[in-house]
Amino acid sequence: MSERSAQPVPDPFSPAVTAGGAVAGDIELSHESGLDLKARSQWAYARIRFFRHKLAVISLFVLAFAAIVAVFADQIAPYGFDEFDFEHIVAAPTLDGWHIFGTDQLGRDYLSRVIYGLRTSLWVALLVASVATVLGTIVGAVAGYYGGVVDNILMRLVDLILVVPFLAVLLVLSAYLGQGKPIRVGIIVALLIWTGLARIVRGTFLSLREKEFVEAARAAGAGDMRIMFRHMLPSTVGPIVVTMTLLIAVAILLEAALSFLGFGVQPPTPALGKLIGEGAGEGFSSWWLVTFPGVVIVTLALAVNFIGDGLRDALDPQQRTRA
Amino acid sequence: MLTYVIRRLLFSILVLFAASILVFWGMSLVTSPLGFLEQQPGVSEQTIQNIKDRKHLDDPIYVRYGNWVRDVFTDKFGTETISDQPIWPDLKRAMGHTVQLIVAAQLLAVLLGVAIGVYSALRQYSAVDYAATMFSFVGLAMPVFWLALMLQVLFVNIYLWFDVRIFYVASLNSVDPGTGIHFVLDRAQHLALPIIVLAVAGLASYSRFMRAAMLEVVNSDYVRTARAKGLDERRVTMKHAFRNALIPLITLLAIDFGAILSGAVVTESVFALDGMGLYFLTKLNAGDPYPVMAFLMVTAVLVVVFNLIADLAYGWLDPRVRLE
């Protein structure tokens, strides 16, 4: 992270100027003075800034690895997630039978269960982040674009969600509407965490609304929808992508907490939080049952947060000074 | 100013009513504590009918909601469905324990967080700064309940191997806690791990936040002015920079109250502490809407109050902010 401030990268294109018209790839410009200048697109600069954040790049590899393991869980996991091995019951990590993460109370290979748990948790996290992002963007865009009464109603709705104790409501909802299905749990979590993004998008739209290019688009006869989503949205892409990344980490942690408390994903589907909960029920001498799924959760959340940090450097450099 | 407070409070009351209707309707439609009772072979229909009559559960839902609202104001949240136990004494006792936990953890987190944040900002990019940054990244990526469990695993195994009890890993007291100083020490030995868990979660975000706030202030014009007129460095940092950097943290603390409470719910559940979080989870599992509603209303009122305090404090501490 130290390199970040060493060489300030010129950022000649303010997001608003290149909105919707970013040129892909590099263009060579030759100046009369004989100086060769390389003109780069906004995205090329973003890429450079991102790759300067070493932790973010490493995290990208970690996350890619996790994603591959999750997608090919059936091929990679040495055992099925509900396959019993009666010779090894609550066995500590051992090379005997390749139970390198040990086995649980029913003799199920814990590495395989963690791999399948990773698949569930990643899937739920992506679902949550996508739904929350779409919802937050639409609500924020509509509120910021129309302003007035619409804005007031939507923002009071956001206040309403923010005012009630978050985890408690989440627990009540998922206890009675979640019914343990990953997709339902995901949607319920998403319905409660889109508010932060909505506020960010609304703020940007409020200021973009007054810009000349919006006026130009309107003069050219573009409709509200077109102005909002073709002209204004591309200028907001940076903050949205950054926030979405951070939402993935939030979702991973929330789903883990819900499943741990018994209100999230239900057995037989293994989820990382659920594995920790079941492991804790086995008493604390079998430390591996609690440790390994937790390490995976921390690694995932950490990687996603670092990537978010890198993306903020890349796409939203003004936010650097803030937290 | 006064109109601002009144408008905020009126709006909050409206929101609380809306939220209470939503949760009450939702819970009553989907679940009932009687469902479990009805499946018990030993329970006669007469018993169940008696409970229904007592709580007027056969009335339409808006009548039941009305009854609930009446009970909230006249009977301190009324009674539980099956046992007919009054809710408030239990909730009040549990709240007292939660307050002990939260106050201790927040004190620890804020003091350490401010110290680390300020040091990191003054020695930016030093080894300590990097270590603190790493710590807060890991802290923010770590589920609270997992940290709690790992500490339990650690201290249980220390006890098993070395026969030394450093901290207790569950509940609030020993069976026979003693009195006076013995009681306090016993309580401290029980609360130590939960306090550490909550404090780590807070520390991770406060130190990060304080660092950012301090950096912003240290690089501002009036600090440069103070330095230019020849004040010594200590005065510049402590009197000019530090005080102003504290303002955003104070508001963060008040706004974060809901999140702090959520952390307490999870922590209490792991350590089996008789606090309001565990109370809530137990009643939620039993499917009884009345105590769950009581918990939600109490915490929602607290969140509203703390949010209001946050805004007022901000306006008071930073006169540039005007509330309309």
Image (cartoon, coloured by chain):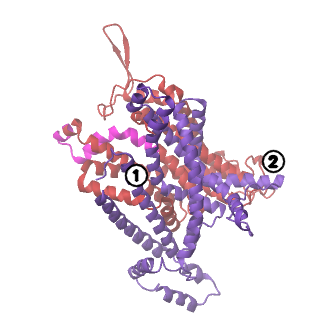
Is B110 left, or right, of A234 in this rendering? Answer: right
Residue A231 forms part of the magenta stretch: yes
Q: Is residue A268 something that shows in the picture? A: no
- Asked if residue A18 is among those painted magenta in the image, a careful observer would answer no
Q: Colour of chain B?
A: purple
Query: Residue B226 in the image: x percent, y percent?
Result: 41, 30
| Res. A269 image quadrant | bottom right
* Residue B126 drawn at (x, y percent): 58, 29
Instruction: Report whether A31 appears left or right of A258.
Output: left
- Which quarter shows the N terminus of chain B? bottom left
Label of residue B313 in the image: 1
Q: Residue at x 59, y 61 (%)?
A: B100
| Element under disc 2 | helix
Residue tagged 2: A96
Question: What colour denotes chain A?
Answer: red
Q: Which chain contains the residue that carries disc 2?
A: A
The kind of residue on which mark 2 rests is Asp
User: Is label 1 in a helix, a strand or a loop?
Assistant: helix
Q: Which residues are magenta?
A: A216-244
Looking at the image, which residue sits at the far bottom?
B46
Most foreground residue, B108 or A142: B108
Q: Position of residue A213 (x, y in %)?
A: 23, 36
Q: Amino acid at mark 1?
A: Ala
Q: Nearer the viewer, residue A271 or A292?
A: A292
- Give the main secondary structure, helix, strand or loop, of the magenta stretch: helix
**Left or right for B253, reference B321:** right
